[in-house]
Image (tube, grey):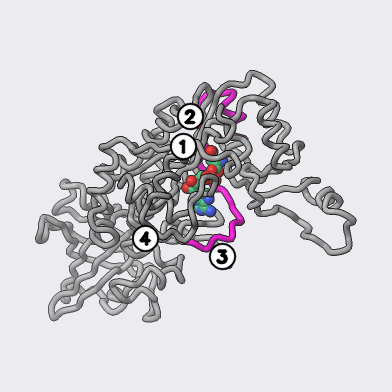
Amino acid sequence: MQHIDIKEIFGNQELLNNNVTVCGWVRTARDSKNVAFIELNDGTSLKHLQIVIEKDSGIQLEQCLKLGTALKVEGKLVPSANNIVEINASSIEVLGTAPADYPLQKKRHTLEFLRTMPHLRLRTNTFNAVFRVRSVMAAAIHEFFQSKNFVYVNPPLITGSDCEGAGEMFQVTTIGYQDGKYESAEDYYADDFFGKKAGLSVSAQLEGETAALAMGKIYTFGPSFRAENSNTPKHLAEFWHVEPEVAFAELPDVIALAEEMVKFVIGRVLEKCPQEMQFFDKFMENGLIDRLTKLISEDFGTITYTEAIELLKKADVDFQYPVEWGCDLQTEHERYISEKIFNKAVFVTNYPKEIKSFYMKQNADGKTVAAVDLLVPGVGEIIGGSEREADYDKLLEAMKVRNMPLDPYADYLDLRKYGSVPHGGFGLGFERLIMYVTGMANIRDVVLYPRTVNNIR
Ligand code: 4AD
């Protein structure tokens, strides 16, 4: 269908005083004595294009003015007030009608209300802006890694090994458990599609390590799945995960890479999405642009877990979860560290080995591992990573201590037998970074169709 994107109309002086054709959905409409106005949006631009219809133009107005109607409009592009342009319509074709029960009749709806209609909420300014920023961020992720010689690899989503060992895998099965049919779980799995237990990947890291130990620097960017029973504003059962893995690298290299990547992606959004960011600054979080500009212009903080615990213990705050060396940091602790102690993004390093995954490099103190989490004000943890244990015997021991089955990890252990090198990487929760960048407070509002406990459609 021949037409011009509305975004192009705003950016192209040469189209002025020419006949153009645009398509889009009616966002608002106003009828007066001699003339009617429509604000049309085709999704390419946050800004709507005004269509002016003279009453004597012969255009049938009735259906055109109904919100949500899809139109094809032809007319002359002319200057209007405030340095903007509008179209004087010469003909309008109704491509799709929208009756009066079209749900988006009001100018502003609550995010909760819009969550009940994920298929229509994308036609609002908020979601239009969120998904435009999300797209720019995804492109920036690729641009960043590609420019630094990283190879983009696509790991399997169905896997036989649980990367985090936390038992949060969704099972993949074609038969389902049939009570009484099998003598043991092993018999049941043997009868299933893959002949053994399989699930959806919680992280591409294990496969990423095999690729990094061949290609040096790799990254993955795809969905991870977690059957966590966490009904919070920052957990999804299906989220997008950016996972770089680097050979010949130690913990400080992993930290430097994470800081550079976060700053690059935010810089690209500020540069490429000024209208969207002004929108978020106005409606979601006042001062957002200043906060992000400050973040990318200064060094991120760094603190060890042990130092963080000391400071949390001294804090004059009644935490819901008590703080002791060895405890996992809860969101309230993470936010205190990044918001009150540092007031900026901060890396927390060297956690107790008992609360972190089996694959992390064991430090010389015998108590901690070379782990790192990146905490940001408002959201908490957005990145988790580590240097990996490259020593076969130490890795095997860590797996045995956790009573892990060794068979599913045979390939992973092999990597430590054949040319093992210091290496490490991290996982960025893509939606969490989008929350931080847009000021959106709930992770369900930065993903097309959120999958959470008791919620799928
Ligand atoms: O800290 P996590 O569990 O680390 C890993 O999965 C490592 N294997 C990554 C690696 O080193 N390659 O998860 C990494 C990040 C978290 O910091 C968080 O941002 C995000 O993934 N994440 C979630 N995001 C949304 N919903 C969930 N349920 C998430 N679980 C983790």
Does the Cβ of the disc 4 residue fall within 8 Å of ligand 1?
no
3D distance between C-alphas at marks 4 and 3: 19 Å
Front residue of 80 and 56:
80
Note whether residue 457 is visible: no
The amino acid beneath tag 3 is Ile
Task: Judge left or right: residue 212 versus residue 253.
Answer: right
Tag 3: Cα neighbours inside 10 Å, few (<14), some, or many (≥20)? few
Query: Given contact means CB atoms under 8 Å apart, are the residues at marks 2 and 4 in contact?
Result: no
Q: Secondary structure at mark 4?
A: helix
3D distance between C-alphas at marks 4 and 1: 35 Å
The residue located at (70%, 53%) in the rendering is: 172
* Residue designated by label 3: 456
Query: Mark 2 or mark 1, which is nearer the start of the sequence?
Result: 2
Tag 1: Cα neighbours inside 10 Å, few (<14), some, or many (≥20)? many
Residue 264 lies in the magenta stretch: no
* Residue designated by label 4: 127
Which of pointers 2 and 4 indicates the residue nearer the eye?
2
Q: Secondary structure at mark 2?
A: helix
* Residue designated by label 2: 251
Quarter of the figure with residue 52: bottom left
Tag 4: Cα neighbours inside 10 Å, few (<14), some, or many (≥20)? many
* Residue designated by label 1: 349
The amino acid beneath tag 2 is Leu
Q: Quadrant of the C terminus?
A: bottom right
Tell me the number on the disc at residue 369.
none
Which of pointers 1 and 2 indicates the residue nearer the eye?
1
3D distance between C-alphas at marks 3 and 2: 38 Å
